[in-house]
Image (cartoon, rainbow, N blue to C red):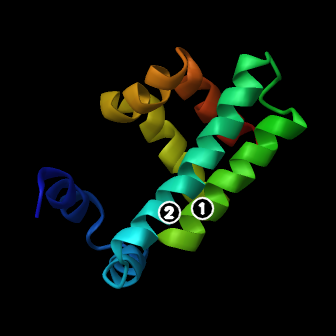
Amino acid sequence: MNEYEDEAQERWGQTEAFRQSQAKTSKYSHADFQAAKVDQEAATEQFAYAFGNSLGIRSAEAQTAVIAHREAISKWFYDCSVEMQKNLAKMYVEDARFRKYYDDRVRGLAQFVHDAIMAQ
């Protein structure tokens, strides 16, 4: 296991979401992981579009990104409820690694993603 897998096991290993993710991803090919990344990147691009065009967190575009984000997680990893998605949103602003992922795309995007998810 790499450090991220170890961390995930330690933090969420006892959860149903972790078990679902392990069951799904254990069967994935490299192409499957690439497809999952495409879906995740598409949702991120939707957030970036809304943010970059100064659309509000409750705008149709931002909320479409929220839905795409949740659906990508549910499709590829585990059943992602609104509550689970809101927990992820907190992590996106509290964990420097996630904040960097979004803010390297567009400065301030992590907070926008968080706020849009929390606004649903």
Q: What element carries label 1?
A: helix
Marker count (numbered)? 2
Q: Which amino acid does label 1 sit on?
A: Ala
- Residue at the image point whose x is 79% and y is 16% from the top: 54
Q: Where is residue 65 in the image (x, y as percent from the top left)?
A: 72, 44
Q: Is mark 2 on a helix, strand or loop?
A: helix
Question: Pointer 1 and pointer 2: residues touching (CB < 8 Å)?
Answer: yes
Question: Residue 88 has which mark?
Answer: none
- Residue at the image point whose x is 79% and y is 43% from the top: 63
Image vertical order of residue 48 relative to residue 72, above or below: above
Image vertical order of residue 67 relative to residue 36, above or below: above
Q: Earlier in the sequence, mark 1 or mark 2?
A: 2
Question: Residue 72 has which mark?
Answer: 1
Image vertical order of residue 11 relative to residue 93, above or below: below
The local crowd at label 1, few if under 14, some if 14 to 19, many if 20 or more residues have their Cα within 10 Å, is many
Distance CA(mark 1)–CA(mark 2): 7 Å
Q: Which amino acid does label 2 sit on?
A: Ala
Q: Quadrant of residue 119?
A: top right
- Residue at the image point whose x is 57% and y is 24% from the top: 109
Question: Of tags 1 and 2, which is closer to the observer?
Answer: 2
Image vertical order of residue 93 relative to residue 43, above or below: above
- Residue at the image point whose x is 41% and y is 32% from the top: 101
Where does label 2 land, which residue?
36
